Image (tube, coloured by chain):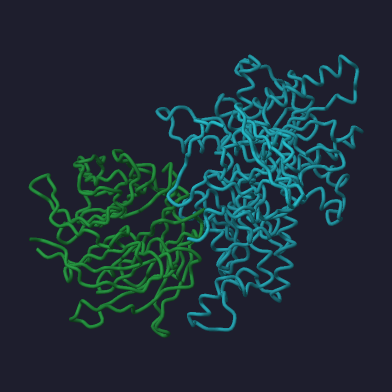
Amino acid sequence: MAFSSALVLTDLNDYIAPSQACIKPVEIQKTADPGHQSEIKVDDQGGYYEITQDGGESKLEKAAISLNDCLACSGCVTSAESVLISMQSQEELYGIIKANQLALEQNTPDKYRTIVVSLSPQSRASLAAHYNLSPLQIHKRLTYFFKQLGCHHLVDISFARDLSLVESAREFVERYKSATAATGGSDPIVTNSATPVAGGGTTAASRRRGGAGGLKAKSQEHLPMLASSCPGWVCYAEKTHGEVLPHISNTKSPQQMMGTLVKDYLATKVNTRPNLIYHVAIMPCYDKKLEASRPDFFMQEFDTREVDCVLTTGEVQKMFGEQNVDFNQLLEAPLDTIFTKALLNPSETLYGSAGSSSGGQMEYIMATAARELFGIQLPSDPSQSDQVVVRIGRNADVREYSLETVDGQVLLKFATAYGFRNIQNIVRKIKTNKCQYHYVEVMACPGGCANGGGQLAPPPVETVNAKDWVNHVENIYRSVDGVLPEQNEAIVAIYNEWIGDPSTERSRQLLRTQYHAVTQNLVNPLATKW
Amino acid sequence: MPHLELLATLEGHQDRVWQASWHPTKTLLATCSGDKTVRLWAPATPTDFTKWVCVDTLKGAHKRTIRSVAWSPSGNEIATASFDATTGIWERDPQIADWECMATLEGHENEIKSVAWSSSGALLATCSRDKSVWIWEVESDNDFECLSVLQEHSQDVKMVAWHPKEEILASASYDDTIKIWKEDEDDWYCADTLHGHASTVWSLDFNAAGDKIVSASDDKTLKIWKQDGGKDGSWTCETTLEGYHDRCIYSVSWSKIHGLMASASGDNTIQIISKDGEAGYRSVAVMQDAHGVHDINGVAWFPTQTHQDWLASVGDDGLVRIWRMVE
């Protein structure tokens, strides 16, 4: 057996021989036979065969890692992440459309799927910036484009986002109330950070132990509450900071809310099975593909995912080329009548939410909490109120909103933290019981979702500064007026009809999710000892 | 004939010793080891420098090798960088006469290779096998805030060193390059990349003025880099020092007092290199088998005039040696 000349030792490091370990242990089927000894043979094509004692050969399965396993932890041995991510691509959508055509020709209605495409407002803003059109024009052209292609609906993620905002705010108020009850009525955050150590003392030993969390009050497991809509952040927390998972909101992200709307509510409404609906979401980043493929979002009884395929803004732009469409010349179709946050008559107007391109959780939750907990009416953009003090942290991705009484007492303190370095600081503060916030809108991308990894590239550096471009996309995003969920009649109607009582088990299943810390139990045998 | 004279050999570490760091003002040496501790050494008496004692041991905070140790410029804190992916910040509590780990900085994905304090003590830098360089700001109440996570090296980053005066950082990597990092508005960026070494750059140090850098590499050479055209200029290689070592050079230290450089190699020698004329350099002293047959992992010159002729070396033999440069 010749040693393959293609086998090269790469990525060697001085102490660790294999490449960085993949977090996901690969499961191998082992035979129960105790005395079993096997020989492995490699043939010329690189196929691996196990030779049993009686001389028989059986081809060995290649170990496979699916998108479900991928946590985007950048520990990939084979950089397979890029391969996995291409499994959710426009090719998949073309395949479904073709299958539909076939089903029509062969008159097999049970193979025909209703295709719903959800458009995120951030992707819309990125396209608007690139093609120099308004969000409304983009939305109408995309409606035309996708319907022409064979899709049935183009809906607006902003619509589903309202559900996510309402549920997040409800969850926050729940947590705040239970945390306050645990501390006997006083502010759980202020109480706990003032006394990080129990049993008095500035002795070195207690100082050291106090920060470790062993004496953490129960209430602190509820607050601060952290945003859950960024899968980059969620995957990172699951992989590296399992201890903060209880702090992450259990409310589904707007993408997954739309998934539930489409596969549960819509399926019921049009009397079809969830697996006969194909749901595509257009998103500003690749991590949303990982979110869509989470096992928690797989509907077991119908063998289908809530979101079947996520396309990034960039992938959608590629589709224009693939379909030989000149987007600049494209016709416009009227806005879809379902799941679109807009005014349709007399003229079409799109609506959004107050806040940054990351979704406006901070603004909405603060306004709702102020009203429900303290009876204070804040505008939908709390920074407009005199009672809210706005502070920019050490960089533009950290913004603090502090709701204060006239004599300076802090009632609610919220913040945004976008980008890896700012996430580090929030996580560290939470771990050492020093976090002063009740809620943090955590996002993985500096600049928020307007600057997502899947957004369209800015024009060349000579013409426009990258930061300015992101601000430009952000401004286009914000040009769509915010309307409160409560003022959105369609959402209120659907909520009452479909959810009814949000505290029921069924509602929780529809609106909430859970997280799983990754435990590394496979230790790299060569990496131990030092 | 100039030569290195062995003053003392310090025994105590139970595993290979990785780095030595002198206290900024006192006659006190910190060394870190694979035995997961840091030992502090001082002369037993103020006059006899051939007998040293281990005055303190910092232990219990790290689960794996401590790869790098650094005193803060004030001399009040010690930073330890460990293979367990955390950085410990220690302070001495006079009430219990012991060192306590006051803060643990987490975030790196795997082994941290080096830690360094900026000249003012306001910033801390760490680098790791995860290819990143992290910059932290020292806050009051033993808190450290992450200012930036710099991921531009394509391989393991072996060492970080700050400019002697400015807040400018240099990093050395397995990707054969050195990168210079500066701050701009609210974030740090790579201001320059120094190419030239043919293999891993293990160590680097600035000269007293901060306008030159010496780097030590696996390619058996040292390179002297200088900045063209003032403070914002780019760095170029002024000289390559070849033939001084037969094997990988692991550590280099440039004295800020007398300007001599000390380099330590896998060929078991320590070289003392001096300027020779305008732009030349030459070896003025060599110590063969400084740690016997064992690799020498680090060398460090005494930082002040008090004992400017002292050099500390640490090796795989678990020993710390104090040398004196005799002219």
Quadrant position of residue B22: bottom left
Image vertical order of residue B268 relative to residue A497, above or below: below
Residue reaching furthest to the bottom: B95
In depth, the one of A279 and A366 nearer the eye is A279
Is A509 positioned to the left or the right of A120 in the image?
Answer: right
In the rendered image, residue B45, in percent from the top left (x then y), is placed at 23, 83
- Residue at the image position 51 percent from the left and 56 percent from the top: B107
What tint does the image give chain A?
cyan
In the rendered image, residue A443, in percent from the top left (x then y), is placed at 59, 48
Visible residue check, residue B165: no
Image vertical order of residue A53 relative to residue B13, above or below: above
Q: In which quarter of the image is the N terminus of chain B?
A: bottom left
Visible residue check, residue A366: yes
In the rendered image, residue A175, in percent from the top left (x then y), is placed at 72, 63
Q: Quadrant of the C terminus of chain B?
A: bottom left
Is A363 positioned to the left or the right of B227 in the image?
Answer: right
- Residue at the image position 30 percent from the left and 68 percent from the top: B320
In depth, the one of B156 and A470 nearer the eye is B156
Q: How many marks?
A: 0
Quadrant position of residue B147: bottom left
Is B105 positioned to the left or the right of A185 in the image?
Answer: left
In the rendered image, residue B269, in percent from the top left (x then y), is placed at 24, 56
In depth, the one of A76 and A326 nearer the eye is A76
What tint does the image give chain B?
green
Image vertical order of residue A219 relative to residue A390, above or below: below
